[in-house]
Image (spheres, grey):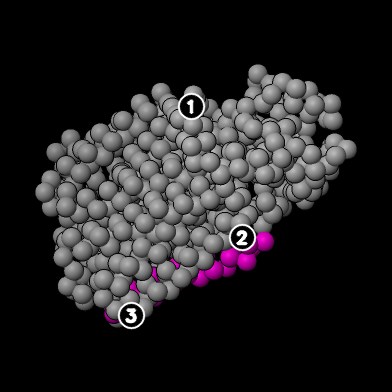
Amino acid sequence: MSDGTAPVNALYRPLDEAEIGRKHWLTVFTAGMGFFTDAYDLFIIGTVTVLLTPIYHLSTNQISLLNSISLLASVAGALTFGKLMDRWGRKRMYGVEVAILVVGAILCAFAWNFTSLFIFRLIVGYGVGGDYATSAVITSEYANRKSRGRLVGSVFAMQGLGLLAGPAIASIFLSAGVPDTIAWRLMLGLGAIPAASVIYLRRKIRETPRYTLSIQGDEAATATTIAWVTGQQPAVRANGAGRAMVGATPSGPSNANGNANGNGNGLRAKLTSKPFLLRLIGTAGSWFLLDVAFYGNSVSSPLILKLLQPTGTLLDHTLISLAIFAVAAFPGYWLAVFLMDRIGRKRIQWQGFAVMAAAFALIWLLPDGATAVGVFLPLFAISYFFTEFGPNMTTFVYPSEVFPTSVRGTGDGISAAAGKTGAFLGALLVPHLLTSVGISGVMGIMAAVSVVGVGLTLVALPEPKGQTLESAAAEEVKPELVAAASSIG
């Protein structure tokens, strides 16, 4: 097993070595529609606040709060759903988070003042955070070995479609002359539709085979699910409901749930032990840094473009944002998906941070970098391409791979929460920074943030490419259990 490719349990072998099939893509679609909605809801608010400013007479502080409060609420959602997935199982939590998101989006469309919209955006954010924690883990635990990055990455790449949908829909309403008092409500309410379309599918998804075996110790259920995914029936010992043969605490269902998941001290001990503490610093820290830059720039892009082109209309700036997302960001997502399992997560992440740093630094240092459209927009677009073909993709994939099954949801939830904390700070502070230090100063700050991201990636994160999930996660395996697994293979 030293090469990281051999399954630690014979039951997993058909799943690890399977080709991508229909059930894999069903899982990706079910998870991906949530991310389409997440991106749409989180980024459409930047245009909505521009429309609402004269209607509700919003101050700069109120604009900053509306732009960022969903991101703060998503921190709580990620932490809550991440921990509950480890305690109660993936299946029991899946679909709950997206239902919360749907309710929040509908309520936002009927908000009657700043305060009500603020509260309803909290609900949206809580659902978004839960979606970040659940979707990556579930997809990863269903994935095969060679294509895990591609599958988990495809879920996240749906964010790219959400990024396109937001400005595209806004442009349609603005160009059609829909009154601002109606347009903003439609923009927010439409976010409920794609999320609602997958609630049923999420509630019907099977418990992941990693959870049923490693935590619940149910070989029969694990074998049934693997056969459902791959069409191959894995080997099961005579006592088919036997104990799990992987994980830190091989035990029956009650002990596995009680010791590995029911005990908060046990979770903390696992995540603060070697090598997982360094990995957690790497996944959470790099996601925090990435989201400071990504959300800070993206949510505030209408304000940035307004400073760049003071005479441009909101429609002009929305179309420019759409062009940047379509030409630069969207291809970046899918190139990352294509190359994730070929060149690896680590290279894509540090390389992306490095080019982001260079692009931001040039905008900051060049005399016309922050004032000339012909200089700023190409560099800004390059930063977006390497954000997506870079850490925006890999920071989502990494936490679903590098923690053991018993704490995978918690580790992923903490990482996502750290990211959304950075997103909240970026979205909250960038409007104020634009008024104090301008576009040039903001880009200088983003360059420094990206440089730190390069270093953290190189120091703290392993390369899980091509490994089984158990090997990538450094799952503890007792030698006698490896022998038992080999005997039934």
Towards the viewer: 170 or 115: 115
Q: Is residue 182 left or right of residue 441?
A: right
* Sooner in the amino-acid sequence: mark 3 or mark 1: 3
> Residue 119 at what x, y percent from top left?
32, 67
Count of number-bearing discs: 3
Give the residue type at disc 2. Arg
> Residue 233 at what x, y percent from top left?
84, 43
**Of the two numbered discs 3 and 1 in the rendering, the one whose residue sits closer to the viewer:** 1
Image vertical order of residue 145 relative to residue 314, above or below = above
Q: Which residues are magenta?
A: 181-204
State which quarter of the image contains the C terminus: top right
Residue at the disc numbered 3: 182
Query: Secondary structure beneath disc 1?
Result: loop
Residue in the picture at 51% in, 32% down: 270
Q: What number is the disc on residue 172?
A: none
Asked if residue 25 is among those painted magenta in the image, a careful observer would answer no
Towards the viewer: 188 or 167: 188
Residue at the disc numbered 1: 273
Q: CA distance from mark 3 to mark 1?
A: 53 Å
Residue at the disc numbered 2: 202
**Of the two numbered discs 2 and 3 in the rendering, the one whose residue sits closer to the viewer:** 2
Does the residue at mark 2 contact the one at mark 3 (Cβ under 8 Å)?
no
Q: Is the stretch drawn in magenta largely helix, strand or loop?
A: helix
Q: Residue reaching furthest left?
A: 436
